[in-house]
Amino acid sequence: MLQHLTNDKQFEKLIKKHLLATMEYLFGHNIPFGVLCRIDHVTFEPPLEARIKADFRPLTLFFLAGYTFESAYIEGEYLSFEAGFGSDNTGSHVTVPLLDIIQIIVDETPIFVNSTARAKNPAAHAETTAAPSPQATKSARESSLEALMSNPENQKFFKK
């Protein structure tokens, strides 16, 4: 059920709309924030040296504050900003695909979570519009009912 939802293009559009609205609010109110994203889809211009790129993890947090925040903008499907990296603060223009932003963080607290963040293989993020199978729906319903019935406090909700 969750996989159906996270692969659904309409749900992805809803998430993207929420992502954009959240970032526009933060930019509009001058609130610095971090974006946790998949580094394999992020581009750097000029490209960063291998020694700097080696420090990045598959999920990397970029914090937008000061000049980095002031340089940030959204264009089309991307968030872009300028940032310095490494001990010598090597400057680069960073471009992040919006749908690869997994979280937006303010004061160490996630305020946005993208449950549709793309899989490493873009083909794995195929368009899904069909409803889940009746078996999957029934299984999810049964699991939910079993969880509800397993708590003695919930017995009052069932007819005897």
Image (cartoon, grey):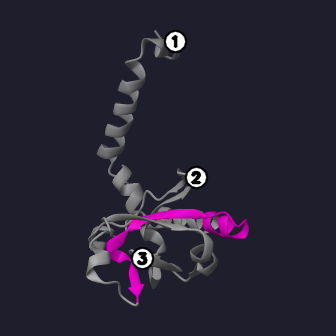
For the residue labelled by badge 1, is the local secondary structure a helix, a strand or a loop?
helix
Front of the two marks 3 and 2: 3
Q: What x and y, as percent, mark residue 62?
A: 47, 67
Q: Earlier in the sequence, mark 3 or mark 2?
A: 3
Q: Amino acid at mark 2?
A: Asp
Kind of residue at badge 3: Phe
Relative to 44, does residue 134 appear above or below in the rendering?
A: above
> Callout 2: few (<14), some (14-19), or many (20+) C-alpha neighbours within 10 Å?
few
**Residue at x-position 67% and y-position 70%:** 27
Measure the C-alpha gap from mark 1 to mark 3. 60 Å
Marks 3 and 2, Cα distance to the nearest angstrom? Answer: 22 Å
Q: Is residue 147 left or right of residue 68?
A: left
Q: Which residues are magenta?
A: 22-45
In the picture, the disc for residue 156 is 1
Discs 1/3, front:
3
Residue at mark 2 = 107
Q: Residue at horizontal 42%, vertical 76%? A: 85
- Would residue 130 be visible to someone looking at this image? no
Q: Residues within 10 Å of mark 3 (few under 14, many from 20)?
A: few
Gap between marks 1 and 2 measured at Cα: 42 Å
* Residue at the extreme bottom: 46
Q: Which SS class for mark 2?
A: loop
Which residue lies most toward the top here?
160
Of pointers 1 and 2, the one earlier in the residue sequence: 2
Eye-nearest disc, 1 or 2: 2
Q: Is residue 50 magenta?
A: no
x, y percentage for residue 153? 48, 13
- Front-most of 106 and 160? 106
Q: Is residue 46 left or right of residue 27?
A: left
> In which quarter of the view is residue 115 placed?
bottom left
